[in-house]
Amino acid sequence: MKKTLQTLCLALFTVCASWFGTQQAIAEVVGSYDVVVYGGTSAAITAAVQAAKMGKTVAVVSPDKHLGGLSSGGLGATDSGNRTVVGGLSREFYHRLWQYYQRDEAWTFQKMPRENGIPGQGGRGIDNATETMWVFEPSVAEKIFEGFVSEYKIPVYKSELLDREKGVVKDDASIASITTLSGKTFKGKYFIDATYEGDLMAAANVTYVTGREANAQYGESLNGVQVGHAVSHQFSGFVDPYVEKGKPESGLLPFVHEKINAKDGEADDFIQAYCLRMCLTNDPKNMVPIEKPENYNELDYELLLRSIEAGQKIFMTFSPMPNYKTDSNNNKAVSTDYIGGNYNYPDGSYEEREAIYEAHRNWQQGLLWTLQHNERVPENIRKQHLAWGLAKDEFVDNGNWPKQLYVREARRMKSDFVVSERHLRYIDETLRPIGMGSYNMDSHNIQRYVAIDSEGRATVRNEGDVQVNPGGPYPIDYGAIIPPKKECDNLLVPVCVSCTHIAFGSIRMEPVFMILGQSAATAACLSIDANVAPQDLDYEILRQRLLDDGQVLEYNDPNSSRILSKKLPGVVVDNSKARVNGEWISGNSIPKYADMDYLHDDNKEKDGKYVLFEFEGLKPGAVYDCRVSYSRHANRATNIPVEANSDVMKIEAVVNQQKEPDIDGLFVSIGLLRVGDDGKANVKISAENTNGYVIVDAVQLLPQTNNL
């Protein structure tokens, strides 16, 4: 009888527990929305605001405690590029900042500066002509984002981390709901992943990549391993890589690799460096001194100390923000970038990411303390840095340190359309623009390695830095933010977009993320109205709504330094399709040039160096004006040998590249060339015995009506 009673009680308990569990699960469903935005970044907020403006129900599920991502996380020196292409809600954000700082009470520690009195990265920091402000305090940016969600009555659920293992429920290719680690479930018709990490995208089983693609994969010039381009933020002198100088057996210094495991342009899995964008101040009334980290290890900063011995004098930026504050970022060889400390971040667990964040914060705190107090640091450098401390009124719930790690790159979606360097340079077409970017193709250093200097000594070098202007503003295709339909048909991804590493290096700027966030929400809302997947949305409808809402989709620059070879008359072969002998270096710093870049010989090791342009399919017997292109400069060679050959004749010429090209400022003619019956020709440009830099860009064969 007793056993039977126990059995009945157990059964009753099980039924009750099951019932209460079911009720608890029901209670944990927060709601069902037209659009669910996962993320607390600037892109997340503009996406949510746009959905609300279009009359849709929307919720923001933020893994972060504070809204705004990097824009409120210390990055106040906006990487704006060409500001004329910043439109829509992104521009509205910078306008609201301007409005805020028009008030005298906004200037708590300094007087309001005179007209345009704070410099910015892309122009004036305070631009009264356009009523925009591009430099700002982190706490003020957060107020603007909070003002957006309050104005549009958008529900925001903060500190809600997605359950990445089982929190995404899909019905075939559609996401039905997402659940956070706290147990909150959000149902939605459409979802937007606006995180820097792409966690929702990955948990929904959308294909993604990390690291660097090989140049050959998408026909690029700046992707993959970059030793040749890594000239900025580089060691300026000899820096011994070993724990005990000159003794390899003592081991390598922390963060230094023995070698690079790939050649220039080849792929690898490494990630460009992260840091924290520190908000410092030199105002004693608002300053918190830098304390020595509890786990400080001087060996971690031996590389810094040796770089100082080699001549490094600058260690970070002090970009001025309002109220005597800074946005302090990486600058020079050893700086705030914790190079190599983030490789496991993109796919890391939340615990692993938190440990990576702490390691970055600890590195920067130790860096500042070393610069201020270590006796091996020259007194003038110590004195300079002792003037700075953390801003007391910023990041008050995190010891005055930004909580947002500068995730310059993590996962990138791999969709049916992949934006590459070629799209940024207009070589490949962008048919469905949803916004524009304009910043440099910018990759921070990725690794440190042991190289051999000119004196045969082992020395430390940085690898991975690229800073190349794409040539002006460029459109970003709608395909960059939509996954393959078979993988997910109700998700948009405006941050971890489908693009290559080097293209993302330009796209990854906060104004652009806000632009893409708004465009993603617009596409989601229009897809709801049309009852279609975003992949099937009529682009013309999307385009018109984006324009109506102030987005900028195209830019015409008559002064662009880039000339597209496909738009030139005749037959043009660019250097990217030529045969190269010897070591030539890509460049595009001096206009004009065809397509992506030009090549130069670095004015070194000229013996046997040449570039051969080969033509096929020409009209047999026809005569062509043979032209070569280059960009003029005073350091160019004046005696460059050029040879053109066909089956029936040869032209030999000498080109002076210190003279301006007389055909459209781009080409010079070396003569008329008749083609033989095989329809082939070639042009060889040599560096042999030249007296300066040799530029090789493109060769044009223009058909002539006259005969030789």
Image: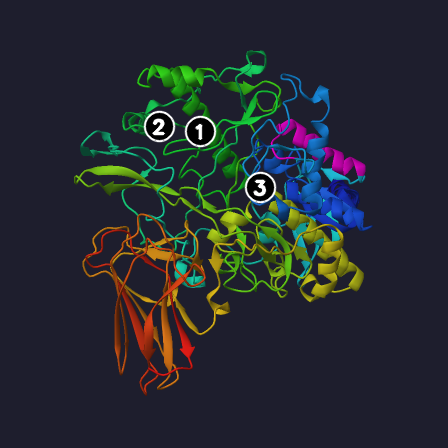
The answer to which of marks 3 and 1 sits earlier in the sequence is: 3
Select label 1 or label 2 by which is in front: 1
Callout 1 secondary element: loop
Residue located beneath label 2 in the image: 300
The answer to whether residue 513 shows anywhere in this view is no
Q: Secondary structure at mark 2?
A: helix
- Closer to the camera in the image, 385 or 594: 594
Specify whether 81 is left or right of 155: left
Q: CA distance from mark 3 to mark 1?
A: 20 Å
Q: x%, y% of residue 226?
A: 36, 49
The residue closer to the viewer here, 22 or 322, is 322
For the residues labelled 1 and 2, the Cα–Cα distance comes to: 18 Å
Q: Is residue 195 magenta?
A: no
Q: Is 636 left or right of 414, judged from the image as shown?
A: left
Residue plotted at (27% across, 82% down): 647
Crowd band around label 2 with a 10 angstrom C-alpha radius: few (<14), some (14–19), many (20+): some
Which of the labelled discs sits on residue 286, or is there none?
none
* The magenta segment: 133-151
Q: Which mark is residue 316?
A: 1
Q: Is residue 445 visible?
A: yes
Q: Nearer the viewer, mark 3 or mark 1?
A: 3
Q: Earlier in the sequence, mark 2 or mark 3?
A: 3
Q: Quadrant of residue 71?
A: top right
Q: Is disc 1 in contact with disc 2, using a CB cutoff of under 8 Å?
A: no
> Which residue position is annotated with label 3?
80
Amino acid on which disc 1 is placed: Met
Q: Earlier in the sequence, mark 1 or mark 2?
A: 2
Relative side of 571 to 153, left or right: left
Question: Where is the N terminus found, in terms of image quarters?
Answer: top right
Task: Work out whether 283 lies above or below 179.
Answer: above
Q: Position of residue 438 (x, y in %)?
A: 55, 49
Label 3: how many residues lie within 10 Å, few (<14), some (14-19) or many (20+)? many
